[in-house]
Image (spheres, helix red, strand yellow):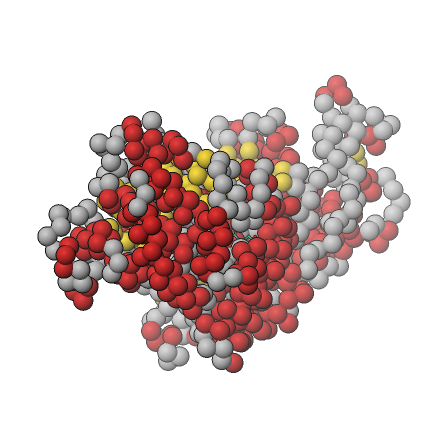
Amino acid sequence: MNAWTSFLPNNYFVVVCVDSPSWRSGAQPDNIVIKATGGGAYKYADLFKERLGVSLEKEDEMDCLVSGANFLLKAIRHEAFTHMDGHKEYVQIDQNDLFPFLLVNVGSGVSIIKVDGHGKFQRVSGTNVGGGTYWGLGRLMTKCKSFDELLELSQRGDNSTIDMLVGDIYGGLDYSKIGLSASTIASSFGKTISENKELSDYRPEDISLSLLRMISYNIGQISYLNALRYGLKRIFFGGFFIRGHAYTMDTISFAVNFWSKGEAQAMFLRHEGFLGALGAFMSYEKHGLDDLRVHHLVERFPMGAPYVGGKIHGPPLGDLNAKISWMEKFVQKGTQIIAPVPMGVPATTGMGGFERPTSKGDILRSDASAALNVGVLHLVPTLDVFPLLEDPKTYEPNTIDLDQDEFKYWFKVLSDHLPDLVDKAVASEGGTDDAERRGDAFVHAFSAHLARLMEEPAAYGKFGLANLLELREECLREFQFVDAYISIKQRENEASLAVLPDLLMELDTMNEEARLLALIEGVLAANIFDWGSRACVELYHKGTIIEIYRMSRKKMQRPWRIDDFDMFKKRMLTDRKDQPYKRALLFVDNSGADVVLGMLPLARELLRHGTEVVLVANSLPALNDVTANELPEIIAEASKHCGILRKAAEAGGLLVDAMAGIQDDLKDAPESVPLMVVENGCGSPCIDFRQVSSELAAAAKDADLLILEGMGRALHTNLNARFKCDALKLAMVKNQRLAEKLFNGNIYDCICKFEPIS
Ligand SMILES: Nc1ncnc2c1ncn2[C@@H]1O[C@H](COP(=O)(O)OP(=O)(O)O)[C@@H](O)[C@H]1O
Ligand SMILES: CC(C)(COP(=O)(O)O)[C@@H](O)C(=O)NCCC(=O)O
């Protein structure tokens, strides 16, 4: 079933549509079912019927809120976060330890719901002092025309001009006997009673801040008291009042922390405004989403959402042309979208000695910027958790944390790479006007994402470098660039295949030990062919592929920056020589020399030892990475010059009939262990082992050796990952900063990290 949620981030009226063919074809819709919840489901029912001929099917609001929250907490890895002193931290929720919790939905009013399970909940309390109170009183007192304006005012406010503080009562002193500091708010708006002033004598900024603190503290306090009443430690806050506003979240967190003396924790939801909409969506039967697992869902951030009047209307656009025009319009509105809201000046008062929530975010997420972080969840039932992960619960793919500083650096690296990348992408599509236009749209889309993340690095959940690199590939795909590096990949494959026979001959003259070393050196040296690395791309102007490969090999000097080669050699050639690995999974990286002169000869050596080899490659193109689709042809070419590869490829079902009989001399050779290819389920230079293809998961069952190759798969991700079988991580570090940060080393250092399980 095709369905989309109308992302009106407002529970007042939330709609979920089910896409019917007649709707899409533009014909008069008949019998369209729209699930709706909230007051608007009643208010606008007649209008929908009259104007669109659509009937609204009303769903209970509480049911929807709870099932929306449960869905988010179950399906989205980085949904819940804490927010204290301006610091946002995503919380890993253990599915088996989610219930019970308190759900506080702060809309116009506030509902406090104790959730015990799926469909099991009770509205235990609430308060009529909520978002509507803030907005209503604020509008009357400040004449603000919009909620956003009122909230923005608060960022420049000082509530000590309005609120009566403990210090105002006790001559500037703390009331320490009962633990109240001088800056605690004793009475919200209390100062105004003793001053002979009119409303117009107070700054609207101060009024807005006083109101915001009064209402947020009150909500925090009532929520905590209810948590206490039911012995709950976790409180999730949702509802459109929150609006991702740092100060609001800090204030609520402070109140919960203050009253619970640190025992209870306030958590917020990334999609806080969509609980009801999602719940209504979940109420459709036949979704088949009951067995939904987090690894089946991939969150993407497409750009082409129809954007009108500051709001997103409808699903992401499927039509490419409409999407590009949208992007062009988006660019015109770009400054409005990406301009950060000015920083607020610090206020002076607080509660319990708390000066003010020191929220550094200072960002009111505008409706416009929300357009950039409304993710679309794709259900991919063929994804699985990689079964050889030692502990999937604690596994974190990204090696480095993208804090603000780190993000700034990668922002620059990726922005600098954009002109070259878009040139290649446009050329790969024939350099037509259409390709140029799509190229522009791609650059704008990716730049807008980068700008949004620069403004708020946690906007899309916990985002690491792997996610950034993947987002770039996703943006290319969104504007239908199928394979930007296709011609480079083909050229490099041809050049490398031409020298492969000589390399194999040379390897065959060596003894086993020397050969194993030469093979590992070969993999590391050939990893230099990486079109994602700026330093490497500059090198390519200085020589032919083969010259660069030779130069890179010549420079190989041991010990490498991490050098476990001797340990690996011992395992292969001494300790358990009579017990070769049964099955090795080789995660290949780049096309050309990297796979042809590096990984294939290593695979051949393992086959020679009697180890089954599975080459694991990307499902979709990413930079110059080789894909699983491309590998059989490369192997077929290589097999023309190598009996071992040919026999193994035949055994693995990789060679088509045309190849049979090329080397008749091998006909009577003994049966070979198979060489196979599987796709990894990814289209990125990195790999997240929480979501791989089920084909790879199946192939991993009997594997006792993993070889991860390249910076993306072995350094940016998985450097610290532990597996249930032996793992060899091989990469050349092609970025100076990363080399320094991870290994105190230098660009072009090599890593050979062997991690046996015993
Ligand atoms: N752009 C906005 N316009 C109006 N209210 C907003 C806006 N952004 C956030 N709010 C807050 O959201 C509240 C409504 O939240 P919502 O979740 O839609 O609740 P309800 O369904 O109870 O009305 C408003 O009272 C206001 O405090
Ligand atoms: C995109 C990459 C991870 C690919 O590396 P590979 O996995 O091919 O070794 C790498 O090229 C990279 O991190 N590039 C950005 C850094 C730079 O240009 O210096």
Q: Residue furthest right?
A: 196
> Quadrant of residue 222 in the image?
top right
Q: Nearer the viewer, residue 132 or 14?
A: 14
**Where is residue 56 drawn, in percent x and y?**
41, 65
- Residue 261 seen: yes
Q: Nearer the viewer, residue 8 or 453?
A: 453
**Where is residue 150 drawn, in percent x and y?**
71, 55
- What residue is shown at x 62% (from left), y 29% (from top)? 259
- What residue is shown at x 51% (from left), y 37% (from top)? 561
- Rendered-image quadrant of the N terminus: bottom left
For this view, does 547 lie left or right of residue 659? right
**Where is residue 213 drawn, in percent x and y?**
69, 42
The relative height of residue 704 versus residue 429 in the rendered view (above or below) is above
- Rendered-image quadrant of the C terminus: top left
**Where is residue 161 drawn, in percent x and y?**
83, 42
Q: Residue furthest top?
A: 177
- Residue 114 seen: no
- What residue is shown at x 85% (from left), y 29% (from top)? 172
Q: Nearer the viewer, residue 199 or 266?
A: 266
The relative height of residue 17 versus residue 557 in the rendered view (above or below) is below
Q: Residue furthest front?
A: 509
For this view, does 304 lie left or right of residue 309? left
